Image (tube, rainbow, N blue to C red):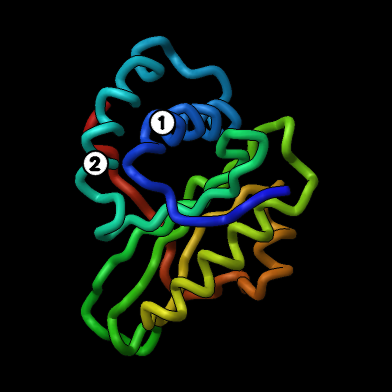
Amino acid sequence: MSTVDHATFADIEELVELRLGYLKDDFGALPQEQTESVPVELVPYLRFHLGRDLRVFVARRDGCIACTAWLLLVDKPPSPRFPHGRTGVLFNVYTRPSHRKQGLAHQVMRALLDDARSLGLDVVELHATDDGYPLYKSLGFMDDSSTHRPMRMMLVP
């Protein structure tokens, strides 16, 4: 049996552990300096943002957090794509390997999307991995077609 709810400050240590698991799955083996620096940077980030502009949903099972999904709330100037300017960026959807293929990510995502609607968000955006793509499609996410190209500039090495 699992329960889905919001993460709290008491969950921060476990959220850091799960974030590292997500990053290792996404990027492969992390260099030692990143394995050490992520917790140092992430703990104060979570202490400041959790419950403010960051909503973390978790599925709890067997005395631990089995699955997470993070929603960063972002206010933008209104546009045709987000008429009220209220948007969310979804990231770090991660299920512990021992709890995968049991529907937990679907449960967590439904709770997150219900919350996003109740907050009046215009849109929830994400970058899907190949593994996560079928889940997001089943929940109603659509491929984004735009004349804009995603780009980035790394400002730190």
**In the depicted structure, whether residue 149 falls above or below residue 38:** below
Disc 1 crowd rating (10 Å Cα; few below 14, some 14-19, many 20+) is: some
- The quarter of the displayed image where residue 72 is located: bottom left
Name the foreground residue: 128 vs 92.
92
Name the foreground residue: 151 vs 119.
119
Expressed as whole percent of the image width and height from the top left, the position of residue 73 reads 32, 64
* Disc 2: which residue: 47
| Residue located 20% across and 46% down the image | 48
**In the depicted structure, whether residue 109 falls above or below residue 32:** below
Q: How far apart are the two marked residues, 1 and 2, measured between alpha carbons? A: 12 Å
Q: Amino acid at mark 2?
A: Arg
Q: In what quadrant of the picture does the C terminus appear?
A: top left
* Disc 1: which residue: 16
Expressed as whole percent of the image width and height from the top left, the position of residue 30 reads 48, 18
The reply to whether callout 1 and callout 2 are in contact (CB within 8 Å) is no
- How many numbered discs sit on the rendered protein? 2
Q: Is residue 34 left or right of residue 124?
A: left
| Residue located 30% across and 20% down the image | 37
Expressed as whole percent of the image width and height from the top left, the position of residue 92 reads 49, 45
Q: Is residue 127 left or right of residue 34?
A: right
SS assignment at label 1: helix
Q: Amino acid at mark 1?
A: Val
